[in-house]
Image: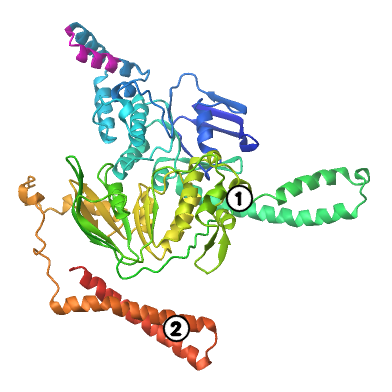
Amino acid sequence: MNYLSAENLSKSFGDKWLFRNVTFGMSRGDKVAIVGANGTGKSTLLSILSGQMPPDEGLVSLRKDISVGFLDQQPQLDNTLTVIEVVLTGDNPALTAIRQYEKALASDNPDALDRAMHQMDTLQAWDYETQMKQILGQLGIHDVSQPVSTLSGGQRKRVAMAQALIENPDLLIMDEPTNHLDLETIEWLENYLSTNNSTLLLVSHDRYFLDRVCNQIIELDQQTLFSYKGNYAYFLEKKAERQAVFAAEVDKAKNLFRRELDWMRRQPKARGTKAQYRVDAFDDVKEKAHQRVGNDQLELNIRTQRLGSKIIELENVSKQFNDNVLLDHFTYTFRRNDRIGIIGKNGMGKTTLLNMITGELRPDSGKIVTGGTVKIGYYTQSDLVIPENQRVIDVVQEVAEVMKLGTGETVTASQFLQHFLFDRAKQYDYVHKLSGGEKRRLQLLLVLVQNPNFLILDEPTNDLDITTLNVLEEFLLNFPGCILLVSHDRYFMDRLVEHTFVFEGNGKVRDFPGNYTDYRERKASEPSERKPSEKPRAVSAPETKPVPSTEGKRKLSFKEQREYESLEKEIEELEQRKSSLLDQLNSGTGSHEELTAWAREIEQLDQQISEKSDRWLELAEYI
């Protein structure tokens, strides 16, 4: 059964075409995702398909007897309503009955309540109400009497999502549904949508979400749609095949174009004396030969200052707002090349910890000591504070006109912008013309051009397209400094994180040795590890008291303490010697015997550094 048809859709803004003559359709039960680079028009296409915006050309047809729900990326809600009033605004008969029931309860009118309950019985709306409360609870919406005007942006997105899911339309259209959701809520939504029989059309950059929910991927690329019947993993495989075929076709067209161009130049200038069919074909070949193959990449290779032995130390840090305890005597000492992910429900203090580390917020007690060589780069969730009438290149040049890469090469601001997929024309666009993802990409660039050696990333994956995410991951995997990361993108976390801070509530933070999937697997296995003979224990005072630091954890001996302190200095001296030898090798001034000796010594130094680093980490566990 066909639900939606789009024929020859075209849309432009000014002189820029987002897409032209795109056609596709959806049938009942389809779960379709639209993917593509930032600025290609994915959100615009969703708005057109949902009826929020007209196309410049083409036609959208919806089956007349179906209901359609639309979740915008930034929902506009009526500030005069409460949360429950927004949630129950749908036209579904069951929702109408629930509205009357809620109104009768508030009015304390027995007759009205009897009529409302009878209507609930008639429509079998009691189960619907139970499902509604489950959805609200899973989305973290507990105070349904709260005015919409008091909600944050993330809370508004959750309320709008609850409204769309509760209404249960035949066709649900969603723009970035996982943004502003914590990881547990994303997993619940993933399971809900994958097991629900509804028809779904969405835009998302969450690769695990796409792989587990969708059965069709549509890519918007170079103003054209490419459709793939399968999940995200299948899409990646087939896209690679398509790009290889396309690259071969363009290469063939370039060779043909060179021959035809030579023929055009050699023949008489008068068009009438040439074979007209060949002249017409030449224009087609020229267009094909000049198509972009699409292998642009973000080559993020930033030169960073070397970190010293002291990085950042947090000692007994506590923070609370009113009665809400976010951190309770949290202690951690950052080490070189730490890759730490932070997970926990929204409102538990993840961003608060980041703000205290950067000095934007002071702890209530405890201390945070930052080493002298640490240079923090902080990528925040907040929007760019840049005048909307400023050009992109001017924004970057205010920070740095030239930058040094890790290779020692110097590049201009314009060249660096091209690495971030801002072509020459885009560099001179005003900021207000950029899409949400392009603004995020610019914000990331502004952080990296300052050459930080300690990166703090608060939800960096929001609004970034998958191409940018893939290359950002490659950069971060090779980043020579420390990374502290908050993200709801599970794939992103799994690739980058080596251990995890888990915010468990009431100020407790668990340092887990592994990435997000490791943690979820461990958490899932914990209940089954209880012996059959054991009875479940109620939560008691001993369970919640902090374990004394002397219990179950030995202290370093005086000798081990001295060894631990000396190891840092020894490792530093070995690395300096290695660096000096590498400079001598690269200079090419030594004899053959000297070069051989230096290479052999570098190999020995690597072995010593590895052994001493392992011993330092072993002792550090007992500090």
Task: Confirm whether the magenta stretch covers residue 300.
Answer: no
- Which residue lies most toward the top here? 111
First along the sequence among labels 1 and 2: 1
Is any part of residue 132 visible from this angle? yes
Is the residue 371 above or below the residue 442 in the image? below
* Label 1: how many Cα within 10 Å (few below 14, some 14–19, many 20+): few
Of residue 181 and residue 260, the one placed in the foreground of this image is 181
Q: Position of residue 345 (x, y in %)?
A: 27, 43
State the CA–CA distance, disc 1 to disc 2. Answer: 41 Å
Is the residue 575 above or below the residue 251 in the image? below
Amino acid type of the residue tagged 2 in the rendering: Leu
Amino acid type of the residue tagged 1 in the rendering: Asp
Q: In the image, what residue occupies the spot 53% across and 82% down?
A: 587
In the displayed structure, does residue 71 sit left or right of residue 571?
right
Q: In the image, what residue occupies the spot 71% across and 48% down?
A: 288
Magenta stretch in the rendered image: 97-110
Of residue 181 and residue 431, the one placed in the foreground of this image is 431
Picture colour scheme: rainbow
The residue tagged with tag 2: helix, strand or loop?
helix
Query: How many numbered marks appear?
Result: 2
Q: Position of residue 57 (x, y in %)?
A: 63, 28
Q: Position of residue 586 (x, y in %)?
A: 52, 81
Which secondary structure is most common in the magenta stretch? helix
Task: Confirm whether the magenta stretch covers residue 109.
Answer: yes
Is the residue 518 above or below the residue 214 in the image? below
Label of residue 423 in the image: 1
Which residue was labeled with disc 2?
581
Q: Position of residue 369 (x, y in %)?
A: 26, 61
Q: Quadrant of residue 329?
A: bottom left
For the C terminus, the quadrant is: bottom left
* Label 2: how many Cα within 10 Å (few below 14, some 14–19, many 20+): some
